Image: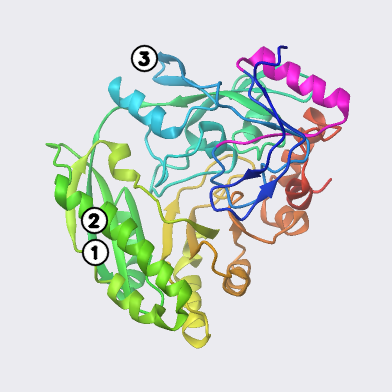
Amino acid sequence: MTDTYARTANTWRNWAGNVTARPARVESPASVDELADVLRRASDEGLTVKPAGTGHSFTATAATEGVLIRPDLLTGIRGVDRRSMTVTVEAGTPLKRLNAALAREGLSLTNMGDIMEQTVAGAVSTGTHGTGRDSASVAAQIRALELVTADGTVLRCSADEHPDVFATARIGLGALGVITAVTFAVEPVFLLTAREEPMTFNRVTADFDQLVAENEHFEFYWFPHTANCNTKRNNRSAGPAAPPGRVSGWIEDELLSNGVFQVACSLGRAVPGAIPSIARISSRALSARTYTDIPYKVFTSPRRVRFVEMEYALPREAAVGALRELKAMVERSPLRISFPVEVRTAPADDIALSTASGRESAYIAVHLYRGTPYQAYFTAVERIMTGYDGRPHWGKIHTRDAGYLAGSYPRFGEFTAVRDRLDPDRLFANDYLRRVLGD
């Protein structure tokens, strides 16, 4: 190893600013071999190791006082296999770069989340997902993984090679090793038609099952302190492409959703009593629109207003009851909530620690503007969600521990057994993993 990619100690902060860490040093290995050497040195020195991407998690999953691994130099596409319809990509590649590169090749992921700033490894390790009736999370589209384990071994896994590791490492929380490459299933690029439409809370909850069944991708946002929602239906289209107009798209996605919303959130934080009035105005600001474009331009949106977030995955049949309970809680409380509540769905998958593992799921996500005290709101929401056997998103704020999670995940023991084998000395441990996985 050379010292060309070693960095001096500094303070690491996540995107939202609610997590900070002071690692002993920061390393940016330029190859798998260099990464393996970093891990061996850290182990010899008695230091723990955590990889960190762009910091879009709201938990301390990447925080460390040991060695922080930055994947800045582990980027790019290793290869596209058109026979198997897969792409293999370096773990530090941002999703936005992957999406653009695939589009140039006439290819696309089947589904994705609503932002694409995360690195590939960060997104899959924490269970990043979008919404889908039939298509699941980003991790569920993985066909193979390469990771470096605690002893410096480069381990490749798939459904056929080390299947026990593959079943766990696709959403591995950084606890099993450092992911260096991911092979995704891809398909020929296609068009999606997005239909965005205001709808009342009562109507969207009454018709929720029908809306999910009739659309490939359905989601909606409820604006607290109002009876108003905004819905989005994405379905495949024969075309032609009809993206939002340059001016109208800028007004909707930048001016209203980011610029004006930033001002509204700042005003609400300064004058909480104004939030219900602001919410009523905000919930009516976005009008109905329909547009057609390639997938990543429909699934994802710019998110420039910074916030903190909690999200729980519930059995899908519990979603409406939990949401109505959440609405009633807000209405009878003194809470003032400036951010909309987001609701999405996913089919069951076979990943041990996926929030949709073994069950069809609905996601309810709550947010507050960065710098706003969130504990009272999130505590009240968490009490509701855990009453429905909710599973917290691994990268979003929650207070659950290994005792709760072992009861919520039937395959929890399978994951911890693989962890015990791959990292018996807990090279990749930190306080967050000790809480959620035990030690």
The answer for how far apart the CA atoms under marks 1 and 2 are is 7 Å
Read off the residue under disc 3: 82
The residue sitting at 47% across, 38% down in the picture is 138
Residue type beneath disc 2: Glu
Element assignment for label 1:
loop
The answer to whether residue 133 shows anywhere in this view is yes
The answer for how far apart the CA atoms under marks 3 and 2 are is 37 Å
Q: Single out the mark in the foreground, 3 or 2.
A: 2
Vertical arrangement, residue 427 with respect to residue 367, above or below: above
Residue type beneath disc 3: Arg
The residue sitting at 16% across, 52% down in the picture is 248
Magenta segment boundaries in residue numbering: 30-53
Element assignment for label 2:
helix
Rendering quarter of residue 263: bottom left
Q: Position of residue 86 (x, y in %)?
A: 43, 20
Q: What numbered label is drawn on residue 252?
A: 2
Q: What numbered label is drawn on residue 286?
A: 1
Q: Earlier in the sequence, mark 3 or mark 2?
A: 3
Rendering quarter of residue 41: top right
Q: Which color mode does the image show?
A: rainbow
| Of the pair 156 and 373, the residue shown nearer to us | 373
The residue sitting at 67% across, 51% down in the picture is 409
The answer for how far apart the CA atoms under marks 3 and 1 are is 41 Å
